[in-house]
């Protein structure tokens, strides 16, 4: 009867509120949860029909909420200078990187790291049967060349990355010999220290074209629904001549660019965000912060893999080596709202 239908709808409404997604309030109003319009009384048939519509909309919402809950975010991290976060010389970056797994939330099935320290044309993805480390830094203490970190390789994932990129007409070759450079192993040693999550590394395109790197992210976006974390590793400020010598905690270099970048990412919708990233050199202080853009472009891959259903969040903002540095997470809006 009408009373039982209304009670059923009320229970659905309560479940909806717990799941934190919206349902058209006009449906609630039509079955008596909200006050009815004056002068109109719903028949039991009409009420059952409205309750059915409500249930269908609820189930659609449940499906959407479940999809959002299972979708991995994408993240752009600041990996610091060489091995400094690992050797106790950069505690701020160390703490930032150690927080990444908590901020990501669900344990990823595997990780694709887009590293600022590998450029290739065409793209290359690590597809070997095992992993090793590539100590691609110079002048640091001997112990920093003895680190051990051997996460499982995942050649099938490398092939999947290659396939997704090629489907979007972005050529990519498999590389069975390259080790994990410090843009890969430094953040992962802190974020996933047990080395038990399979890892694949992906190069930048040597042409350094912003649109290409946004397209790379768009091509790889389906991996997010397969439990794969896309981790873009770089630095939002990377002017080697300016580090330390010109900045201080009170007056860091790169602050103007950091402010402009934050506004571009956090105050725009997805379309506007990507448009601004394509024209990133127009941001205030862009070339002072990145005379060469290889440490900036991983961000575009992370942003490219996000869409209108995602919300960007700044997860790190501090002064590192005298420069203002930020990191960002792109996650489903429902996840962000619950954070």
Image (spheres, rainbow, N blue to C red):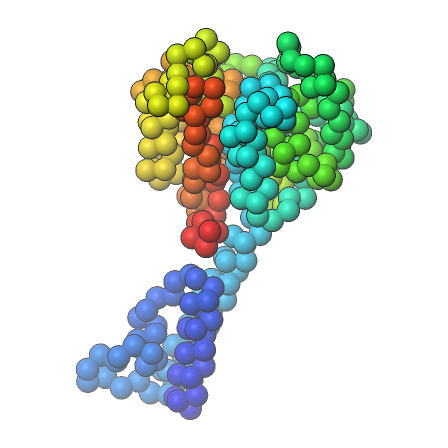
Is 119 left or right of 32, judged from the image as shown?
right
Say if residue 106 shows up in the picture: yes
Residue 315 placed where, x, y %?
46, 38
The location of residue 47, given as percent across then percent down, is 37, 82
- Most foreground residue, 263 or 174: 263
Name the quadrant of the N terminus: bottom left
On the image, the x and y values in percent for residue 325 come to 44, 26
Q: Quadrant of residue 72?
A: top right
Residue in front for this viewpoint, 86 or 43: 86
The correct choice, above or below, for 138 with respect to 331 in the image is above
Left or right: residue 315 compared with residue 117: left
Question: How far across and how far down the image is residue 158, in percent?
Answer: 69, 31
The picture quadrant where one finds residue 277 is: top left
Question: Residue at 80% of width from left, 29% of height from top?
Answer: 129
321 and 160: which is toward the camera: 321
Q: Looking at the image, can residue 179 be seen?
A: no
Residue found at x 68% / y 36%? 193
> Please, is residue 304 above or below residue 21 in the view?
above
Q: Is residue 275 above or below residue 101?
A: above
């Amino acid at each position: 009867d009408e009373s039982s239908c209304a009670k059923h709808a009320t229970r659905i409404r309560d479940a909806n509120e717990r799941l934190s997604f919206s349902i058209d309030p006009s449906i609630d109003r039509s079955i008596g949860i909200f006050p009815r319009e004056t002068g109109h009384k719903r028949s039991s048939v009409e009420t059952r029909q409205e309750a059915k519509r409500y249930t269908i909309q609820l189930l659609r919402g449940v499906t959407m909420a479940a999809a959002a809950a299972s979708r991995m975010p994408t993240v752009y991290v600041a990996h610091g200078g060489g091995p400094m976060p690992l050797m106790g010389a950069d505690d701020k970056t160390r703490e930032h990187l150690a927080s990444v797994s908590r901020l990501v939330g669900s344990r990823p099935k595997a990780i694709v790291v887009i590293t600022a320290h590998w450029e290739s044309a065409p793209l290359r993805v690590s597809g070997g049967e095992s992993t090793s480390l590539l100590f691609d830094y110079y002048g640091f203490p001997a112990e920093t060349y003895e680190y051990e970190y051997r996460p499982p390789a995942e050649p099938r994932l490398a092939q999947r990355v290659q396939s997704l990129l090629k489907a979007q007409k972005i050529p990519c070759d498999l590389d069975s010999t390259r080790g994990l450079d410090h843009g890969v192993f430094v953040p992962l040693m802190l974020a996933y220290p047990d080395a038990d999550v399979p890892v694949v590394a992906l190069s930048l395109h040597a042409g350094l074209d912003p649109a290409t790197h946004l397209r790379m992210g768009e091509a790889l976006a389906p991996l997010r629904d397969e439990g794969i974390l896309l981790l873009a590793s770089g630095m939002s400020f990377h002017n080697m001549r300016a580090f330390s010598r010109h900045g201080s905690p009170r007056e860091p270099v790169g602050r103007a660019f950091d402010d402009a970048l934050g506004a571009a990412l956090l105050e725009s919708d997805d379309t506007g965000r990507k448009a601004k990233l394509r024209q990133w050199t127009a941001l205030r202080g862009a070339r002072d912060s990145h005379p060469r853009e290889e440490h900036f472009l991983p961000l575009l891959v992370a942003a490219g893999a996000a869409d209108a259903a995602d919300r960007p969040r700044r997860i790190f903002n501090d002064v590192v080596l005298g420069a203002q540095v930020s990191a960002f997470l792109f996650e489903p809006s429902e996840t962000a709202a619950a954070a």
